[in-house]
């Protein structure tokens, strides 16, 4: 399999953590690329019309995207229901947590593009503030969750979202007033899958 990859992408990290947890990492070749919405990558676009990473080329030559789909495909390849729980309460909790974490990533990546890519004279601070409000509200909600009981697609996604905040927005200090979430990430981050996929400091 081949995975279109960039070390900064929290969505790609979800896929790599999932593969690591399932013992599939050695079967995935990474194709490294850099891209933004205003500097698209033609080869990637020919595989994924949205021009986004992650995109996975399977051993059958099929192309899969986006990160929830690729992670569930890998789970099925490894026998199923190891990272995505069987239908029932645990599954809906894991999928809701994945949606919440992906939403944090979406807001954070939009801010990143606004601050690092958009020309200075076109930037709109109220819009950035609105994205930060989503992130802070989501983090406050996560502070109330009992994350210790599961390591599945929900908690993998949360760890990757928090890792991206540390990478791009360390100055925001998300750990302040969220000690339980900070302690959870400190412990979860020791897992080999998360340790092996941490982005190098920006
Ligand atoms: O939007 C673009 O044109 C290029 N951006 C991406 O490919 C980002 C890379 S994170 N990926 C996504 O937006 C994927 C989202 C999708 N819903 C999924 O896979 O779950 C780049 C972060 C950074 O450079 O700081």
Image (cartoon, helix red, strand yellow):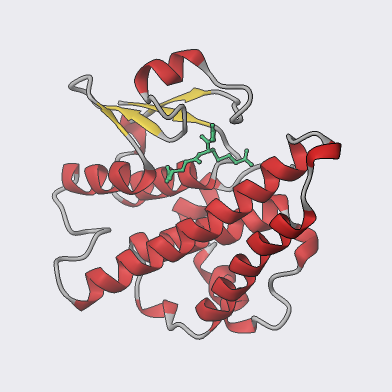
Q: Where is 7 relative to 144, above or below?
A: above
Judged left or right of residue 105, residue 43 is left
Question: Where does residue 69 sit, x and y in percent of width and height?
Answer: 29, 44
Q: Quadrant of residue 87?
A: bottom left
Q: Nearer the viewer, residue 55 or 136?
A: 136
Confirm whether residue 201 shows in the render: no
Vertical comparison of 165 with 180: above or below? above
> How many numbered discs sit on the rendered protein?
0
What residue is drawn where x is 29% and y is 49%? 22
Name the image quarter holding the N terminus. Answer: top left
Place of residue 18 in the rendered image (x, y in percent of width and height, measured from the top left): 36, 49
State the residue at coordinates (59%, 70%): 186
Residue 11 position in % (x across, y down): 47, 45
Q: Nearer the viewer, residue 136 or 72?
A: 136
Q: Residue at x 58, y 37 (%)?
A: 7
The percent coordinates of residue 72 (x first, y second) are 25, 48
> Which of the 4 image quarters holds residue 57?
top left
Residue at 45% over, 65% down: 100
Q: Is residue 135 in view?
A: yes
Is residue 34 depicted above or below 71 in this figure? above
Q: Quadrant of residue 116?
A: top right
Quadrant of the image containing the C terminus: top right
Does residue 60 lie above or below 13 as drawn?
Answer: above
């Amino acid at each position: 399999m081949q995975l279109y990859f960039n070390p900064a992408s929290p969505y790609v990290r979800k896929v790599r953590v999932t593969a690591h947890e399932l013992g599939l990492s050695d079967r995935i070749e990474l194709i490294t690329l850099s891209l933004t919405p205003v500097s698209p990558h033609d080869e990637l676009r020919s595989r994924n019309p949205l021009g986004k990473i992650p995109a996975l080329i399977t051993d059958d030559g099929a192309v899969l995207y986006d990160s929830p789909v690729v992670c569930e495909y890998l789970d099925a390849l490894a026998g199923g229901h190891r990272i995505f729980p069987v239908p029932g309460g645990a599954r809906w909790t894991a999928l809701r947590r994945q949606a919440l974490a992906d939403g944090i990533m979406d807001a954070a990546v939009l801010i990143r593009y606004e601050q690092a890519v958009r020309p200075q004279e076109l930037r709109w601070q109220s819009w950035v503030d609105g994205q930060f409000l989503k992130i802070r509200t989501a983090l406050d909600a996560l502070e109330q969750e009992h994350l210790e009981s599961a390591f599945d697609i929900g908690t993998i996604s949360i760890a990757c979202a928090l890792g991206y905040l540390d990478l791009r927005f360390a100055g925001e200090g998300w750990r302040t007033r969220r000690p339980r979430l900070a302690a959870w990430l400190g412990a979860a981050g020791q897992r080999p899958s998360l340790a092996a996929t941490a982005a190098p400091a920006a």
